[in-house]
Every structure is written in structure tokens, then in C-alpha cells.
Image (cartoon, rainbow, N blue to C red):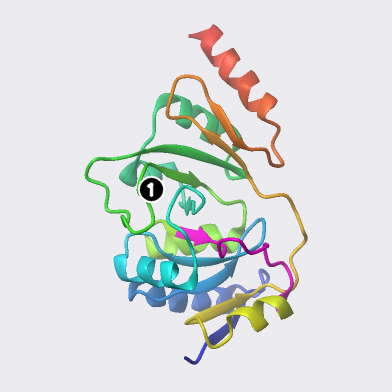
Amino acid sequence: MKTKLYQFILKEREKTAKVLENLANLLRNGGVAVIPTETCYSLAIDATNDEAAQKLNALGVKPGLTNPIIVSDLRMANEYTLINPLAEKISHSFMPGPVTLVVDLLPETKLSKNVFTDGASFRISSNVFTRALASELEKPITVSILSDSPPIYKFKDLYDTFNTKLDAIVSSGDLPQVMPSTVVDVRSPVPHLVRQGPVPFDEIMNLVAKTTVEA
């Protein structure tokens, strides 16, 4: 497989717009790319595409909540998942940003069952490119890392791992090594911490307590 290589440079708007257009078309057609996110380089697919989800599985990505969807805004999240008042409140306060929320799927959701078997996790990314790609695609993007493999931050490691194995690679140079997002399950009235990240869980719980008092 010949892997297309794109470069994302924020200041070069015209080139970035073309990269976004090309990559969105690739994802619509079931392609798999690797893109920069606010944490690390991640595999990316159209979250509604079963064929692309099967390709992810073949690469070694296990289905489940560890594969969040990136949405352009809360409106897009509402089209595919059940955004309860708690999820909405936390989203407005901490997104875009390194917070991922676990929510229930809508009964009629079009998200691929090859990735999402019991609920879904979502976030509005603080990474400009990733959020813009979801907007260009007009659908959520599933982002994943290989199961049982460490995150990739350096372009050389990225290229060595995925060249000739994926449809496209989007380079943003070496990424800073930051903590993965804070993951919180909000499917019940009391939020549950799944993974601690840059946003302290205490801050989220303080917001929940304040909201409860105000109500």
C-alpha cells in the first residue's frame, strides 16, 4: 500500500484547507489515516463506516470505549449519542479540551458497531486540525492507538510504524508528550472516573456539586 503523506502547518491556511478536504474524502471512502491530536498521533476513521472499523480491528485496535469519537461540537455529539444534562454541563465547561465523556448510544445511532459495543466516549478536541477534520467530514471521527502499544509522539516513530500500512499520514512534527485526556463516565447521576488526565477529577466533581446545589 502506498501511504500518502500530508503536512499540517497551522499558519498555511490554504494548504491546510486542501489537506482537510483530501483527508475527509479519504475517510468518507473507508480510508484509515493517522493524525495529530492534542495528546499523541492517533489512527482515524469515519466513525460511521463499518469497512473502516474492520480495518482498524485488523490493525490491532480492540473495539470499546478506549476509542473515543472526536466531534466538531456538541450538536454533532447529540446526533449519535445520548447527551444527558450532566454530559452537556461538563462539555460546556471543559471542552474543547482534554476531557472525554462516556455516554450511552442513541438506539438508532449510525456509529459503527465494529467499534462501539456498549456506549461511546466522545470529546471536542482542542487540537485545531482534528476538530476541523470532523467539521469537514460532517461526521464524528474515531481516534485510536494500537492496543497494547505505547502512544506515538515522534514523527520518525510514526513513519516507521505506519508507512505502507495506512492510506495517509498527517504530520505535525514531533508532538509534546502530554497526559492522555481525563475520561469520565457520566451514564449515571454520579460521574465515575475512568482515567485521570490533565483536568483533575475534583474540578469536574466540584462543577457537578455546584450544579446540583443550584438546581
Where residue 133 sits: x, y (%)?
48, 64
Q: Which residues are magenta?
A: 142-155
In this rendering, the answer to whether 36 lies above or below 155 is above
Residue sitting at x 77%, y 59% = 177
- Residue in front for this viewpoint, 59 or 52: 59
- Helix, strand or loop for the magenta stretch, by majority: loop
In this rendering, the answer to whether 19 lies above or below 67 is below
Residue type of the residue flagged with mark 1: Met
- Residue in front for this viewpoint, 54 or 103: 54
Decide whether residue 152 is among the magenta residues: yes
Where residue 47 sits: x, y (%)?
38, 59
Residue sitting at x 72%, y 67% = 153
Decide whether residue 143 is among the magenta residues: yes
| Dot 1: element | helix
**Residue to which mark 1 is pinned:** 76
Where residue 21 sits: x, y (%)?
44, 75
